[in-house]
Image (cartoon, rainbow, N blue to C red):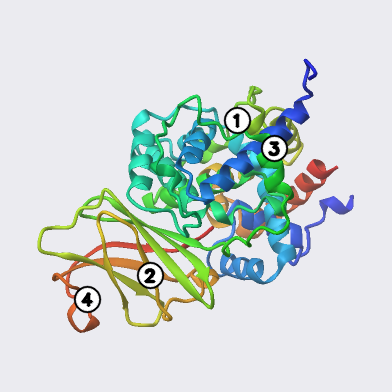
Amino acid sequence: MSIITPLQEDARLARAELAACLHRVSRGDRAALAELYRRTSGKLFGLCLRILADRAEAEDVLQEVYLTVWNKAATFDAGRGVSPITWLAVVARNRSLDRLRRRGRSTAALDEAAELPDLTPRADAALETGETERRLAGCLDGLDARASEAIRAAFYGGQTYESLAKAAGMPLGSMKSVIRRGLIRLKECLDS
Amino acid sequence: MSALDQDPPDDDFDALAGEYALGLLDGPAAARAAALRRRDARFDAAVRAWQARLMPLAMAAEAVEPPPAVWSRIAAGIGKSAPAPAREGVRRWLLDWRPFGVGALCGAVAAAVLFLALPGRAPAPAPAAVATLASSTGGVYFATAEAAGQGTRLIINPLNVTVPAGKSAELWLIVPAAKPYPLGLLASGHAVVVEDATIPKADQLGDVSLAVSLEPPGGAPHGVATGPVIALAKFSEL
């Protein structure tokens, strides 16, 4: 057993562990859900809080997220190349944005969402943080500032083209054009 | 001026997948993209690729430990009902377990590798939709829809719901341009499974809603709702 494990190896193992955990959850294993919660709830709660900026609502949504996971873990398909944490983050983001829209405040938080995310590297390899965050942040920062702000606002604030155009005082077509160009550039930067 | 400074064409697959994954589209454009995702595996893969690309934004939010009450509520929610579909005869959850116990490790690496490498495992139920029905009389019904044979199976999980004494909670299917269709009575203490040929296919629930109304014991007479609607929610596709 080597003393220094390469970080990538850690991440790969951690990802396989989370996938195994989800698989056990799909078979009705409550201990596996508890373990999944122990390992991921901090990150997902952070995401819910970031989107909702309201503790009570974020707690409600976090509860919905894990109950959804309990019921839908069988639809997670490791064979399709989706990492477990991505799957969980998509569920948490969608549930949070649903709540935000119901609240009718989907046009709020544009400024807040446009703030730079905290890029402090984290230790838990299971959550694939650090390097991938820095890489995405680097690529986003290379875009037209209007595009990177809009992408962050859409991600954390559930903004649509329409609400973004309105908030920025830009014609809808121009906003679409800026963001679509940004997305293509972002993909090229991340995939290169 | 490089090619990247040009607007991507309207039918640019990756731009559309990115717009869809970010939720920038609304109304008919979002519905068209959702439909494309269902029928085109390549587009579905492009959306997943964008979800993975954007994942670091989700992870960039600082981790915050949720209060213990959240886990207590989740544990209560899953304790009341069996997960569906049940595949194991022996309920593992009857065993003593603690949420933060040392023994509750998932990380059996051998098992993980076996799982990832196992080609012949049963196909997962088709990805489907969920609806969260927050009741105005307290509590929440979590509804999930999944493909079951030719039809659709709904599983309704109640969480801390209360129904006034002398009333029954009845579930209704609401499809645009059709009359609300009664799907039966809900329980407060355990999950209810509903299979009915009237329910659209699990991947076609984008415009479909569920509602819960308070009815006389035994349900609405003549299949027409009489009581107040205590919960109403549209399905969200997962």
Asked if residue B215 is positioned above or below residue B127 in the image, the reply reads: below
Check if mark 4's residue and mark 2's residue have beta carbons within 8 Å.
no
Q: Position of residue A187 (x, y in %)?
A: 77, 47
* Same-chain status of marks 3 and 4: yes
Mark 1 touching mark 2, by CB under 8 A? no
Find the distance from the CA under tag 3 to the CA under tag 2: 38 Å
As measured in the structure, the alpha-carbon distance from the residue carrying label 3 to the one carrying label 4 is 54 Å
Where residue B227 sits: x, y (%)? Answer: 17, 70
Q: Residue type at mark 2? A: Val
Q: Are marks 3 and 2 on the same chain?
A: yes
Give the residue pinned by disc 3. B110
Find numbered disc 2 in the image and state the secondary structure of the residue it sits on: strand
Residue that mark 2 sits on: B194
Q: What residue type is labelled 1?
A: Pro
Disc 1 to disc 2, C-alpha distance: 43 Å
- Disc 2 crowd rating (10 Å Cα; few below 14, some 14-19, many 20+) is some
The residue drawn where x is 45% and y is 59% is B130
Q: Which amino acid does label 3 sit on?
A: Ala
User: CA separation, marks 1 and 3?
Assistant: 36 Å
**Is residue B18 visible in this depiction of the protein?**
yes
Is B187 rendered above or below residue B100?
Answer: below
Residue B225: which numbered mark, if any? Answer: 4
Q: Which is closer to the viewer, label 3 or label 4?
A: 3
Residue drawn 56% across and 68% down? B31
* Up-down relation of residue B57 to residue A160 (above or below): above
Residue at label 1?
A: A117
